[in-house]
Amino acid sequence: MALITTLQCSCGKEYLIYVPRRILYKEIFRGGGVGLGKLIDEHERDRGEIALAGETAELRGVEFRDISVNEIIQCECGRVFDMLRIIDLDIKYSGVGVLNYEEVLKDTAV
């Protein structure tokens, strides 16, 4: 199943975000695991899981982002989120790679 998470800006705008395994594994394993991550990503895309996430976002009235396309999210209010930095900080803080954005958002806004 595709790794999907949410992000809510302080202005209230909400995002549904697809995090590819190749990006996550690269951050967790410091460069290793990218090959396995790519295979999983291809499988998820072939099964339509990423497209389904986009449809889910549309039904919920939130914006969908695929960070394999662009890891920087700039909200309409001007706040900028560097998703790679958020993932990296979360891994550092939690030690297990569980994505808990609320804990690290205060450290990532530009």
Image (tube, rainbow, N blue to C red):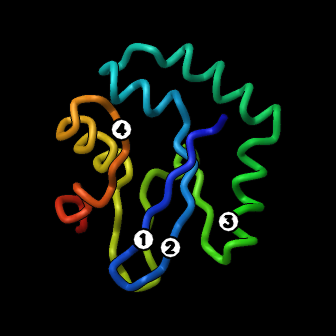
For label 1, count other residues whose C-alpha is less than 10 Å away and answer few (under 14), some (14-19) or many (20+).
Answer: some
Instruction: Say which residue label 4 marks.
Output: 98
For label 4, count other residues whose C-alpha is less than 10 Å away and answer few (under 14), some (14-19) or many (20+).
Answer: few
Question: Mark 1 touching mark 2, by CB under 8 A?
Answer: yes
Q: Quadrant of the N terminus?
A: top right
Compute the Cα span from label 3 to label 2: 9 Å
Residue 61 placement (x, y as % from top left): 67, 77
Q: Is residue 58 above or below residue 35?
A: below
Q: What's the amino acid at mark 1?
A: Gln
Q: Nearer the viewer, mark 4 or mark 3?
A: 4
Of 68 and 37, nearer the camera is 37
Of 100 and 86, nearer the camera is 100
Instruction: Say which residue label 1 marks.
Output: 8
Q: Is residue 62 above or below residue 66?
A: below
Q: What residue is at 34 percent from the left and 30 percent from the top?
A: 27
Left or right: 37 as drawn, with respect to 75: right
Left or right: 83 as drawn, with respect to 35: left
Of 17 and 84, nearer the camera is 17
Q: Earlier in the sequence, mark 1 or mark 2?
A: 1
Q: Earlier in the sequence, mark 2 or mark 4?
A: 2
Name the element at disc 4.
Answer: loop
Q: Earlier in the sequence, mark 3 or mark 1?
A: 1
Q: Earlier in the sequence, mark 3 or mark 2?
A: 2
Residue 16 placement (x, y as % from top left): 56, 61
The quadrant where residue 88 appears:
top left
Compute the Cα span from label 3 to label 1: 13 Å
Q: Which mark is residue 16?
A: none
Q: What residue is at 77 percent from the left and 51 percent from the top?
A: 52
Compute the Cα span from label 1 to label 2: 4 Å
Q: What's the amino acid at mark 2?
A: Glu
